[in-house]
Amino acid sequence: MSIGKLMVFGTHVIDQTRSNDLYKTRRKELVGRIKEQFPEKKDGVVVIFAGFEQPGRRFVQDSSFFYLSGINEPGVVLAIDMDGFSTLYVPAFAQGSRCQWTGVELTDSEGPLFDHIDEIKELGRVEKGITLCGYPIEDEYKGLLELISQQIKKDGFIFTLCPRNSNSYCWQRLVLERIKTLKSELGNVLFDVSSIVEQMRRRKDLFEIEQIYKAAEVTILAHEAAAQAIAPDVNEREVRASLEYIITGSFSEKAFPTIVASGKNSTVLHYSENNLLMKSGGLVVVDAGAEFNHYCADITRTYPVSGCFTDRQRKIYEIVLDTQDYIAAIAKPGYWLCNNECPEKSLNHLAKEFIQDKGFGDNIVHGIGHFLGLDVHDVGDVNKPLQENDVITIEPGIYIPEEGIGIRIEDDYWIAKDGAICISDGLPKKPDEVQLLVRQNFSEDEEMCRQVDYGFLEDETDA
């Protein structure tokens, strides 16, 4: 049963700034690739599930669902047949109930139609609540189950996102496993196309590059605010608050939990407590990213709490920065993020070799970078060579817990035809520039710099 048009208000909206043709083009490409990979399976339908809301948490759409639909509403299902005809299945919530609570209304009245969706149908029975739990009962998915039954009856196939990797597409797989208990034959006609979708998502189009640039711009502003909140005896949380205020005020969200890690915490990669007082003479690692229009940035800087690096800190900082500059200069299509069989063209191996030659080979604890996009750690196989329009991070780091020194510098790079373009180069990272950025709000910055209490580092070492 068609429910006609879908009215959307409030926060869960389709991004009207994007061309509807973009989603049609992506779905057309997906169907074409499926036909190439499964030429013998001519009768099929692609079924992709949106994410689900969790009480008390911000809704985060499944990235692949958004990539193919541009729709940020939970609980809906997208079906695409082999001719590219698209159907959106939406939960039939009780009239007015969801609109009352969330500002989203599903009605037959006049309203903006998803121009790139060919048909909208009810997912199942009328729901009394305003959300689906992700563990459907038969009536809730009646419309979709009818589609699946039709495919099974005519020996058709269901193409979906169900990789064996337990870390991917958990919601998709949970719903599919539940549907299998209702339609046991589903397992015989189900085929995973997650690798195809991920290949498409990995290579960014120009619109996506633009969104990542905007996310980086917001993150740069947030970092500048954080740097100017740094001072001895200031709590890490105050720095985080300054940073996240800018992100929120810039119509963005946090791409991941902000890291503000000072002293020994700077050597803890995913430190998240952010609740200690920063001490004079120490360092603070700030790792943060804005999510703008679903696309993420990821930028890290290491700041001197007192506004000046010690000689030891500066020496290590410059090694980390030189490593990043070296890797960024050679990164281009044909190199790998990581490849054990071809270390001479593996950015990870080359970075570690560079740092090892400087005497800090035992102080490297993570890889050189990752893919970036709709997810902070975006889809992409690090064992496959870089290609034009990949977006990656380059983030070398040196960590010496016994000295309370952790230094990481991370920027976002667009892989172009002949090399890597830094998306986040607007944020200072040369040591003198970083010092000035921190000291902007110091009332007597030069005096503060001279009066650094280096004894803090000795006390921490003794502890």
Image (cartoon, rainbow, N blue to C red):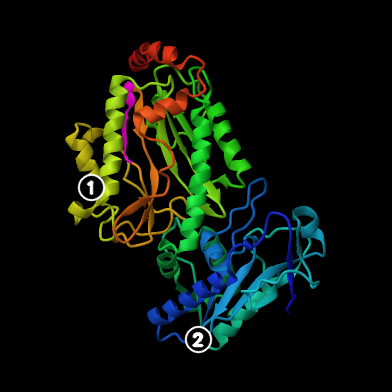
Tell me, for residue 43, which label it has, or none. Answer: 2
In the image, what residue type sits under mark 2? Answer: Asp
**391 or 121, nearer to the observer:** 391
The quarter holding residue 92 reads bottom right
SS type, badge 2: loop
Q: Which residue is the site of mark 1? A: 349
Query: Which of the two residues, 157 or 334, is positioned nearer the viewer here?
Result: 334
Q: Amino acid at mark 1?
A: His
Around disc 2, counting alpha carbons within 10 Å, would you say few (fewer than 14), some (14 to 19), or many (20 or more)? some
Placement of 22 over or under 39, stated as above or below: above
**Residue 387 located left or right of residue 183:** left
Few, some or many residues within 10 Å of mark 1 (<14, 14–19, 20+): some
What percent of the width, then of the height, locates residue 31?
A: 48, 78
Which residue appears at 44% of the width and 57% of the height? 166
* x, y percent for residue 20: 59, 70
Q: Nearer the viewer, residue 215 or 280?
A: 215
Q: Residue furthest bottom?
A: 154
Q: Is residue 190 visible from the viewing direction of this image?
A: no
Q: Quadrant of the N terminus?
A: bottom right
Horizontal side of 234 relative to 392 (left or right) equals right
Dividing the picture into quarters, in which one does residue 131 lie?
A: bottom right
Residue 295 in the image, given as x and y percentages of width and height: 51, 54
Name the image quarter holding the C terminus. top left
Q: Is residue 23 visible?
A: yes
Q: Which mark is residue 4?
A: none
Disc nearer the start of the sequence (2/1): 2
Q: Nearer the viewer, mark 2 or mark 1?
A: 1
Range of magenta residues:
396-403
Instruction: Give the residue displayed 55% in from the left and 64% down from the top.
Output: 65
Q: Which residue is at 57% across, 32% downward?
A: 242
Residue 373 drawn above or below residue 253? below
